[in-house]
Image: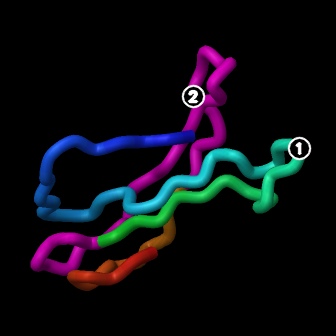
């Protein structure tokens, strides 16, 4: 998985700051996929009620719904 960003962006809330989607593949350095969330805003943000889901590159449906825990990210905090 690769991503590129052109120009400058200014985030004002919780953003996905890291993504690893190669977990479990043959020769992959990590066993699991993961994302990292970062609160780029100036206010605390609760993740209660939020979820993450994904689809494989060869899939046609979204799978593996994961509900996030009742965590509150303070400004500048990662999860």
Q: Is residue 27 magenta?
A: no
Q: Give the range drawn in magenta.
A: 39-66
For disc 2, the neighbor class at 10 Å (few under 14, some 14 to 19, many from 20) is few
Residue 74 to residue 21: above or below: below
The picture places residue 50, in percent across and down from the top left corner, at: 39, 56
Image x and y of residue 69, in percent: 50, 70
Q: In this view, does 50 lie to the left or right of 19?
A: left
Query: Residue 14 has which mark?
Result: none
Query: Is label 1 in contact with label 2 (beta carbons under 8 Å)?
Result: no
| Residue 21 position (above or below residue 57) | below
Q: Nearer the viewer, residue 51 or 19?
A: 19
- Tell whether 9 sits left or right of 33: left
Element assignment for label 2: loop
Q: In this view, does 41 lie above or below 35?
A: below
* Residue found 11% across the figure and 59% down from its top: 10
**Which residue lies at the image location 38% right of the left edge and 62% below the top edge?**
17
- Residue 35 in the image: x percent, y percent? 52, 59
Question: Left or right of 73: which side holds 43?
Answer: left
Please give the label number shown on residue 26: 1
Q: What is the CA distance from the residue labelled 1 to the residue labelled 2?
A: 23 Å
Mark seen at residue 62: 2
Q: In which quarter of the image is residue 56?
A: top right
- Identify the residue at horizontal 26%, vertical 84% (top origin): 74
> Which residue is at 82% across, 48% downward?
24
Residue 1 x/y as whole percent: 56, 40
């Amino acid at each position: 998985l690769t991503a590129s960003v052109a120009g400058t962006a200014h985030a004002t809330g919780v953003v996905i700051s890291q993504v690893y989607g190669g977990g479990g593949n043959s020769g992959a350095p990590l066993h699991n996929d993961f994302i990292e969330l970062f609160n780029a805003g100036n206010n605390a943000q609760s993740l209660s009620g939020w979820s993450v889901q994904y689809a494989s590159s060869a899939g046609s449906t979204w799978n593996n719904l994961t509900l996030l825990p009742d965590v509150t990210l303070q400004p500048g905090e990662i999860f």
